[in-house]
Image: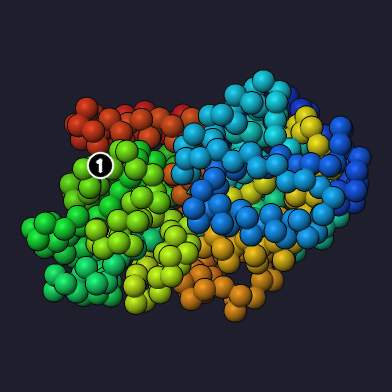
C-alpha cells in the first residue's frame, strides 16, 4: 500500500499530551477469548456502531453470526444508532464517553478521528491483543500505523472502504443516448452528460443529507486538485483560500446543481435507491453502496456500474472502520471476544462479503468476494492512497463537523461561494 505519509498518519498535525497517554495505559484482561474475567461479566458485549439498517445491518449481522459461533456463551447486544457515516451516533457516543458510560466496544475510523478518542484518554491500548491473536503481520503496516500512537495500538480494523466511487444506472444512460459504461476522463466530460440528462428531465445525480454532500465535495476536491494537493489540504501545504480550491468549489456547486431537490431529507440508502430504481442516473458514494445494489439482486456491469469518480482514476480515497476497547468498558471479557472475532479471518471474510468493503487482513482470499470487490482489492494494491475527509481518516471530528456546517450553509443557499471557501479555510486551520 502506498500511503502519502504527509497525511493520515496518526501522529500528524495534532498536539499529543503525556497526560492522555497515562490515561490510556490500561489493557485488556487477556482472559483468552471471552471465557470470563471482565470488570463485571463476560456474558455480554454491547457493540456500538451506526450499522443500524439495510445492507449495513446485513454486514453487521454476518459478523454477529461468526461471533455467535466463536463465542456462543456471550450475548451480543446491539448498540447501533441509525444515521449514515455516524451522523447521529458520534454525538451520542461522545456524550456517553463523557458521562463515563462507554459501550464495551465502538466503531471508529482509522486516522485522525481515532486520535480524538486517544487524546481524550477514552481508549485502552490493545497491542497485547495483537500479540495474543497474532495480528502483527495480519494487516498492512500503513493501516496499523493509522491505529497507533506512540507505540500503542488503539483498535482492530474490520474493513477498508473506497470513497471515490461513481455509481450509475446503465439503462438510464442508454435511454438518453449516453455511454452506458459511464467512463469519463474528467469532470467536464461527466458534466456534459449530466447536462443532457438534466435537459431530458431525469435527475442526473442523486445525493442525500449534509454528510453525503461533504462526501461529494471531497471527491471533487480530489478530482480537481489531484492526490498531492488534496493531501496538502490536510497538512497545510495547499492553500484553502487559493484559486485551485476556488475552481474545485465551483465544480462542486455545479455538481450540486444536478441533484435531487429532496436531498436534505434523505440518507445514503435513499439516494442510492434512486439510482437502483432508475429515478436518477448517478450517485457518488463509498463502496458500502455495492451491498445495497447486490442485496436487491442487481448485477454489477449489467444493472449498475461503478468507476472512480471522474478525474480520480488511479487514486483510492481510503477509509477503514475499526473496533476499540474503551476505558471503563463494563464487560471487558465481551469486548475481548468481539475483538477476536473482528480480527479473525472468518469474521473479516463474512463481514466484508456482506458489507461491500474489502478485508483489512491481507490473507483473505479474493475469490470469496464479489466482482466489484475484487476490483477494489486490485485498486487498493496498486493505486495512490489518500485519506477520506467525510469518514474520519483525514481530520479530527471537530474539523469535519465545521466543514459539514459550512457545506450545509452553502448548499442550502445561506452562504455564497467565497464565504464557503473562507469558512472551509477556518474549519481546517486548527488541524
Ligand atoms: C462510513 C463507514 C462505513 C459506512 C458508511 C455509511 O463512515 O465507515 O462503514 O457505514 O459510513 O454509513
| In front of the other: 112 or 198 | 198
Residue lying at the far top in this picture: please name it: 99
| In front of the other: 77 or 142 | 77
Residue 51, given in percent of the width and then of the height, sits at 55, 47
Q: What residue is at 40 percent from the left and 51 percent from the top?
A: 269
Up the image or down, 8 lies above or below 279; here it is above
The residue labelled by disc 1 is 262
Task: Judge: label 1 CB < 8 Å from ligand 1.
Answer: no
Position of 367 compared to 337: left or right? Answer: left
| In front of the other: 224 or 197 | 197
Residue 174, given in percent of the width and then of the height, sits at 19, 74
| In front of the other: 82 or 92 | 82
Position of 216 compared to 234: left or right? Answer: left
Colour scheme of the picture:
rainbow
Q: What residue is at 58 percent from the left and 57 percent from the top?
A: 59
**Quadrant of the rendered structure where residue 183 is?**
bottom left
Up the image or down, 407 lies above or below 137; here it is above
Q: What residue is at 66 percent from the left and 62 percent from the top?
A: 348
Q: What residue is at 16 percent from the left and 72 percent from the top?
A: 175
SS category of the residue bearing label 1 = loop
Residue 431, given in percent of the width and then of the height, sits at 48, 34
- The reply to whether residue 223 is visible in this rendering is no
Up the image or down, 40 lies above or below 223; here it is above
Q: Around disc 1, counting alpha carbons within 10 Å, would you say few (fewer than 14), some (14 to 19), or many (20 or more)?
A: few
**Quadrant of the rendered structure where residue 307 is?**
bottom left
- The reply to whether residue 74 is visible in this rendering is yes
Amino acid at each position: 500500500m502506498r500511503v502519502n505519509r504527509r497525511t493520515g498518519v496518526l501522529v500528524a498535525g495534532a498536539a499529543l499530551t503525556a497526560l492522555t497517554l497515562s490515561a490510556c495505559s490500561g489493557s485488556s484482561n487477556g482472559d483468552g477469548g471471552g471465557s470470563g474475567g471482565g470488570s463485571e461479566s463476560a456474558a455480554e458485549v454491547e457493540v456500538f456502531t451506526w450499522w443500524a439498517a439495510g445492507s449495513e445491518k446485513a454486514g453487521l449481522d454476518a459478523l454477529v453470526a461468526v461471533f455467535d459461533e466463536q463465542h456462543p456463551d456471550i450475548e451480543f447486544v446491539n448498540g447501533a444508532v441509525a444515521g449514515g457515516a455516524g451522523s447521529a451516533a458520534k454525538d451520542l457516543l461522545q456524550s456517553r464517553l463523557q458521562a463515563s458510560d462507554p459501550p464495551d466496544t465502538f466503531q471508529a475510523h482509522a486516522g485522525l478521528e481515532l486520535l480524538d478518542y486517544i487524546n481524550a484518554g477514552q481508549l485502552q491500548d490493545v497491542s497485547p491483543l495483537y500479540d495474543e491473536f497474532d495480528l502483527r503481520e495480519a494487516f498492512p503496516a500503513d493501516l496499523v500505523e493509522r491505529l497507533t500512537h506512540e507505540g500503542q495500538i488503539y483498535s482492530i480494523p474490520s474493513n477498508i472502504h473506497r470513497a471515490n466511487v461513481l455509481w450509475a444506472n446503465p439503462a438510464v444512460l442508454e435511454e438518453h443516448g449516453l455511454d452506458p459504461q459511464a467512463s469519463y476522463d474528467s469532470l467536464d466530460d461527466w458534466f456534459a452528460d449530466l447536462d443532457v440528462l438534466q435537459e431530458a428531465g431525469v435527475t442526473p445525480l442523486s445525493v442525500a443529507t449534509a454528510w453525503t454532500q461533504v462526501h461529494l465535495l471531497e471527491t471533487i476536491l480530489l478530482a480537481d486538485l489531484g492526490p498531492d494537493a488534496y493531501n496538502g489540504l490536510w497538512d497545510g501545504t495547499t492553500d484553502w483560500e487559493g484559486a485551485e480550491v476556488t475552481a474545485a468549489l465551483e465544480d462542486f456547486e455545479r455538481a450540486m446543481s444536478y441533484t435531487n431537490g429532496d436531498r436534505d431529507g434523505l440518507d445514503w440508502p435513499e439516494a442510492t435507491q434512486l439510482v437502483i430504481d432508475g429515478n436518477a442516473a448517478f450517485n457518488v458514494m463509498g463502496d458500502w453502496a455495492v451491498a445495497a445494489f447486490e442485496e436487491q439482486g442487481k448485477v454489477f456491469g449489467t444493472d449498475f456500474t461503478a468507476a472512480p469518480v471522474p478525474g480520480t482514476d488511479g487514486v483510492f480515497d481510503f477509509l477503514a472502520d475499526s473496533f476499540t476497547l474503551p476505558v471503563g468498558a463494563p464487560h471487558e471479557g465481551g469486548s475481548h471476544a468481539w475483538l477476536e472475532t473482528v480480527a479473525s479471518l472468518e469474521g473479516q471474510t463474512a463481514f466484508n462479503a456482506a458489507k461491500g468493503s474489502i478485508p483489512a487482513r491481507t490473507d483473505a482470499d479474493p475469490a470469496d468476494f464479489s466482482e466489484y470487490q475484487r476490483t477494489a482489492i486490485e485498486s487498493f494494491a496498486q493505486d495512490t492512497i489518500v485519506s477520506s475527509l467525510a469518514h474520519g481518516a483525514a481530520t479530527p471530528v471537530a474539523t469535519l463537523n465545521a466543514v459539514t456546517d459550512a457545506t450545509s450553509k452553502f448548499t442550502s443557499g445561506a452562504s455564497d461561494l467565497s464565504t464557503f471557501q473562507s469558512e472551509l479555510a477556518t474549519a481546517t486551520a486548527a488541524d
